Image (spheres, rainbow, N blue to C red):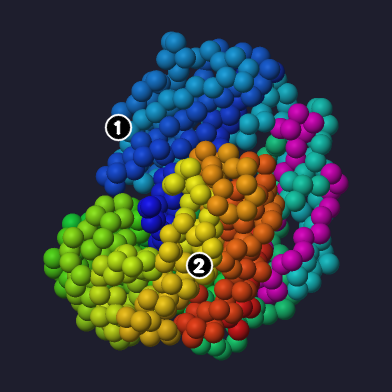
Amino acid sequence: MRFRHRAAAGLATLLLPLSGLVALAGPAQAATSATATYAKTQDWGSGFEGKWTVKNTGTTTIDSWTVEWDFPSGTKVTSAWDATVTNSGDHWTAKNKGWNGTLAPGASVSFGFNGSGSGAPSHCKLNGGGCDGTSVPGDEAPSAPGTPTASDITDTSVKLSWSAATDDKGIKNYDVLRDGAPVATVTGTSYTDTGLTKGTDYSYSVQARDTADQTGPVSGAVRVRTTGETEEPPPGDKIKLGYFTEWGVYGRNYHVKNLVTSGSAAKITHINYAFGNVVNGQCKLDDSYAATDQAYTADKSVSGQADTWDQPLRGSFNQLRQLKEKYPHIKILYSFGGWTYSGGFGQAAQNPAAFAKSCKAVVEDPRWADVFDGIDIDWEYPNACGLTCDNSGPEAFENLSRALRAEFGDDYLVTAAITADGSNGGKLDAADYAGAAQYLDWYNVMTYDYFGAFDKDGPTAPHSPLTSYNGIPQEGFNSAAAIAKLKAKGVPASKLLLGIGFYGRGWTGVTQSTPGGSATGPAPGTYEAGIEDYKVLKNSCPATGTVAGTAYAYCGSNWWSYDTPSTINGKMSWAKSQGLGGAFFWEFSGDTTNGELVSAIDSGLR
């Protein structure tokens, strides 16, 4: 039995966008259509393996294919196979070989490469076409609709109207974009957007689609601020913490402003920015482009102001700074490690004081010293095995925690994400978590990823059970067991946060609707097989039952487990009954656009 945790809890998430799929598509030739998808199939810290798959989704044969994309600075292809790959700066081009350029309708071909860096592809084209898989050469794309006008603005809604686009074959419908993301598709030239947060800025634009499903250029944007004032959460003693992933700004297109537009920023108390790296025994900024360099336009910026080329700080760090100005109650911690980057902690434990000093230098870099209120350490796992195995000894984690507190002092938060393996002789018994707790403000107990399709044959089981149940595959693999063990070791309940996953884990080839069934492998997922966001599962495979305080769903031959607003409410009630310090979750982008899981945590802890 393997026991995994999701990048700050765990493998699957930390590898995003490393393991993320980016849908890319464009025209191959007249009367054809095609798609290209990218996946990172392996990652070994200093490099990775990527794979592109080109598929003919049309009705006529494609004679050749060319895939183009951009990598952020620092990410590059080092070798390739089954395609000729060249580059001009950060722009990369892959052309078919002489033997694999022809694709019959429905056929597909893959090529791969080794690379270095941690970025994801963007601005992709297939045979010169766009990336939406709908462009048809020889058919004129629609014009841009008129810039929307806003009316009937309330605390929670706004009416949008725009002038029609034109097209040689006719307009089919319009996509309404809120802050650059589609929120509705309508046939007319008006739409009322509801469920908004009062006192919040939004940006709206529209895009036309013709009868061939081609999309035209996006219209100009109108900025709207809902009426009323932004509400600060009432005072309380419960922590509500969410992880914001550095790589989420790429394939997931999830940015700091999404915390505002979803209403989540007003309902949380803390954010963990994940992840910084641990290299040569020291803390290190990982993706500088995402963190400090990416330029934001006005419509995607928390402040509503566009970044300039010469400002000293851009990227997510600057957006977090703006978020704190808007929501001064939020505290932000810089999280280091995670599933992929935990291999560096063993060396760090050899000189804890030097490690702590390096971390302080990164967290308190003068360019963003005002952004972070503390540090979070996600070591998976001290004196135990995760992606790699550590043999630093049971005292290493306490030594590291002591050094961090000495370096950061009492004015900073110092926390840690830890295993939730409550089994006898399991990971919670491998290190001195009680001894380390005296130096830490709290533990994020990763009470999820207990079971999943990393055991491809099953049995099916909920990945985040609150309690044990008849037939559970491994005793001690549940939240109650982990919390009880930590309390028994002497960790105060107020220093324990219950973990919630904003995603599900699933199998395919399942014939039994209830837990305990056999399977043939992982269920299909958007970014990685066996894993899917809650925002997708709630519609694609709605819950059909509950077990051990969490939900499961059976649809077709797929079986999924995940938390819903209802089960989260039950878990929050349990957390309060146990005197826990609050809850945390992995991670924001798995929630719906209106933040319904964050809302469930917030209301459940009041």
User: Taking 401 as reference, is 212 left or right?
Assistant: right
Amino acid type of the residue tagged 2 in the rendering: Ser
Residue 585 percent across, percent down from the top left: 50, 67
Residue 258 in view of the camera: no
401 inside magenta stretch: no
56 left or right of 443? right
Q: Give the vertical position of 49 relative to 436 (above or below).
A: above
Q: Quadrant of residue 108?
A: top right
**Looking at the image, is 133 positioned above or below residue 412?**
above
Q: Earlier in the sequence, mark 2 or mark 1?
A: 1
Closer to us: 378 or 482: 482
Part of the protein shown in magenta = 187-214
The structure residue drawn at horizontal position 66% and vertical position 14%, both measured from the top left corner, is 60
State the SS at label 2. loop
Which disc number belongs to residue 468?
2
Residue drawn at (43%, 72%) of the image: 481
Judged from this view, the residue extending furthest toward the front is 470
Q: Looking at the picture, does residue 318 appear above or below residue 504?
A: below
Q: Residue 512: in sight, yes or no?
A: yes
Q: Alpha carbon of mark 2 to alpha carbon of mark 1: how far?
A: 48 Å
Q: Would you say 371 lies left or right of 549 here?
A: left
Quick check: marks 2 and 1 in contact, CB under 8 Å? Answer: no
For image coordinates 36% across by 39% down, the residue present is 42
Q: Which mark is residue 320?
A: none
Q: Position of residue 234 (x, y in %)?
A: 60, 87
Q: Amino acid at mark 1?
A: Thr
* Residue at numbered disc 1: 78
Residue 192 drawn in magenta? yes
Position in image of residue 70 (x %, y %)? 44, 37
Alpha-carbon neighbours of circle 1 within 10 Å: few (<14), some, or many (≥20)?
few
